[in-house]
Image (spheres, grey):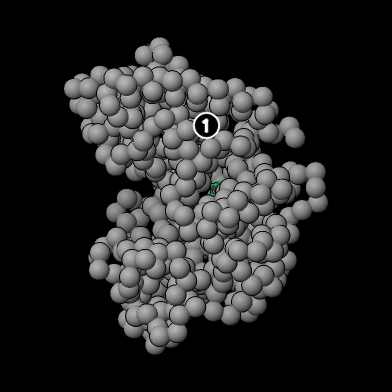
């Protein structure tokens, strides 16, 4: 298929991995250890999944990994461009790395991902952060072996941010973060061009992976012990539109549901404009598809939605939610909201609060609008002051926190099946896991339960998590 990278090119890249391996073998002989790589990921799950690919390639090329940049021979930051604060964090880290590079000039610093797919950013980095050795955009990910090899050989800055609509690559190594749950990308890119969003410019056009490739990957994951699959795409509802085969996202869900050994299926993200009855019915009919839906509505006011180029109205959104709740009782709902879109007034914002109150989401990811150079919304003038926007943002949190807590309260006293993620990050005496509705549950138990499905009785509810205890009945 045309949007696939040629197998010959993949073979060529694998050859570069072998050449790096030779360099790293020499490093081992000289230093008595493998070179260490440190990776950091900013932004969304797609980026997490891309970093798993980067780590897979690096591992294959003879690198081990370390937690801190201070210990590393190679640092790669996989960046995000969705909001300014994600970019600022990277600039902050680059400032720290500058000192590190001064004391250890042999350290290699690489930047990749959405932020550096933008030319004005790369110009800035070249000017201010001369200590960066390697810059590659989202479209050059599969070329990492060649680019890193050139960096190691030439010892001068290598940049590859060629822009294109985007291609898909298969059959490169991947090193996953979890042995129980896995992200599986089903499509890349976005065609929606919401007026505030940089993603379509840095991730290219929508392109779907062949279903056989997706199913093959999932079967392999299952044979490695993975039981929970999260299907990823910027807009999974567009899956298949660009394929010759007659297949859509609902069809794909059914196929994944049929794979023995898969126990839970999640997906993100759905765009409300393409979300419809077929998918709702499929979710209800497929026993492994979790009763959970992330459906970003962004803003409640119809004029603002139009100016955001979202393609639906508040009423249409609410109607879709009504149908979801009707067909899948107890479903847990989450959403993304932007507060302070340039033309949003205080009155418009009330429509956002109204949607919150009507839908009663389990959780909400809310963001203050961030101006993105090159997007249509960047040309709009602001109606509200920064202070007013912050006041609205805080109001939104206040309203939603009360709803989230109330929704969690309804779990108390009931018993749920939880997939154990492992020891809790905040308290090493507790285990942490998730219900099928994606609620975080903390409870006491043996660390050996990691990766297992257990029954947990919920005893206490907080705003963002639940506490519980292992129920007698195991499963
Ligand atoms: N400013 C603030 N939030 C944004 N998002 C996307 N672009 C912007 C922006 N310019 C949010 C949207 C999207 C989520 C991934 O990030 O809510 O759903
Ligand atoms: Fe951005 Fe809209 Fe595409 Fe989501 S659907 S990635 S918000 S342009």
Query: In the image, 441: left or right of 332?
Result: left
x, y (%) of residue 266? 56, 62
**In the image, farthest residue toward the bottom:** 413
At a point 61% along the width and 67% down the height, the residue shown is 289
Farthest residue toward the top? 154
Residue 212 in sight: yes
Q: Is residue 86 above or below residue 128?
A: below
Residue 111 horizontal/vertical position (percent): 40, 30
Question: How many marks on residues?
Answer: 1
The foreground one among 254 and 306 is 254
Considering depth in this image, is 375 or 359 the residue closer to the camera?
359
Horizontal side of residue 103 vs 393, given as left or right: left
Q: Position of residue 184 (x, y in %)?
A: 57, 50
Q: Position of residue 318 (x, y in %)?
A: 59, 70
| Quarter residue 38 falls in | top left
Q: Which residue is mark 1?
A: 141
Residue, x 61% and y 37% (percent of image)? Answer: 171
In this rendering, the answer to whether 72 lies above or below 356 is above
What residue is shown at x 57% (from left), y 53% (from top)? 221
| Above/below status of 246 relative to 431 | above
Q: Secondary structure at mark 1?
A: helix
Front residue of this view, candidates 91 and 359: 91
**Front position in the image: 250 or 458:** 458
User: Residue at the spot x=39%, y=42% of the render?
Assistant: 41
* Residue 261 position by quadrant: bottom right
> Is residue 425 positioned above or below 7 on the image?
below
Q: Quadrant of the N terminus?
A: top right
- Tag 1: Cα neighbours inside 10 Å, few (<14), some, or many (≥20)? some
């Amino acid at each position: 298929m045309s949007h696939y990278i040629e197998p010959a090119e993949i073979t060529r890249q694998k050859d570069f991995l072998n050449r790096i391996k030779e360099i790293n073998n020499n490093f081992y002989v000289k230093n008595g250890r493998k070179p260490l790589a440190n990776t950091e990921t900013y932004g969304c799950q797609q980026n997490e999944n891309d970093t798993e690919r980067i780590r897979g390639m690096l591992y294959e090329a003879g690198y081990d990994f370390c937690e801190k940049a201070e210990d590393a021979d190679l640092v790669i930051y996989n960046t995000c461009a969705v909001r300014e604060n994600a970019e600022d964090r990277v600039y902050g880290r680059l400032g720290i790395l500058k000192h590190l590079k001064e004391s250890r000039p042999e350290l290699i610093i690489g930047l990749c991902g959405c932020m550096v797919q933008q030319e004005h950013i790369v110009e800035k980095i070249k000017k201010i952060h001369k200590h960066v050795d390697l810059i590659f955009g989202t479209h050059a990910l599969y070329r990492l072996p060649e680019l890193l090899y050139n960096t190691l050989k030439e010892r001068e800055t290598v940049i590859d941010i060629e822009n294109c609509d985007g291609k898909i690559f298969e059959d490169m190594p991947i090193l996953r973060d979890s042995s129980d749950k896995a992200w599986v990308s089903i499509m890349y890119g976005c065609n929606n061009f919401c007026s505030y969003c940089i993603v379509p410019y840095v991730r290219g056009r929508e392109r779907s992976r062949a279903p056989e490739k997706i199913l093959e990957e999932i079967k392999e994951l299952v044979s490695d012990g993975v039981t929970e699959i999260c299907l990823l795409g910027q807009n999974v509802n567009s899956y298949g539109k660009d394929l010759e085969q007659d297949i859509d996202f609902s069809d794909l869900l059914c196929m994944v549901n049929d794979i023995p050994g898969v126990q839970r299926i999640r997906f993100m993200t759905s765009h409300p404009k393409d979300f419809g009855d077929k998918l709702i019915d499929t979710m209800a009919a497929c026993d492994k598809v979790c009763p959970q839906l992330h459906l970003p509505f962004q803003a409640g006011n119809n004029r603002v939605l139009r100016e955001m180029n979202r393609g639906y109205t508040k009423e249409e959104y609410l109607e879709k939610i009504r149908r979801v709740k009707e067909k899948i009782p107890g479903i847990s709902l989450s959403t993304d909201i932007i507060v302070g879109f340039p033309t949003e007034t205080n009155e418009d914002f009330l429509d956002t609060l109204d949607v919150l109150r009507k839908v009663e989401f389990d959780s909400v990811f809310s963001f203050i609008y961030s101006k993105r150079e090159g997007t249509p919304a960047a040309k709009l003038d602001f109606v509200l002051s920064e202070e007013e926007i912050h006041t609205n943002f805080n109001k939104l949190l206040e309203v939603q926190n009360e709803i989230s807590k109330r929704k969690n309260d309804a779990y108390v006293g009931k018993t749920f099946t939880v997939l154990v993620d492992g020891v809790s990050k905040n308290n090493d005496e507790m285990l942490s896991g998730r219900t099928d509705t994606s609620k975080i549950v903390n409870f006491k138990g043996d660390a050996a339960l990691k990766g297992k499905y257990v029954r947990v009785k919920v005893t206490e509810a907080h705003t963002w998590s639940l506490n519980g205890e292992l129920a007698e009945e195991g499963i």
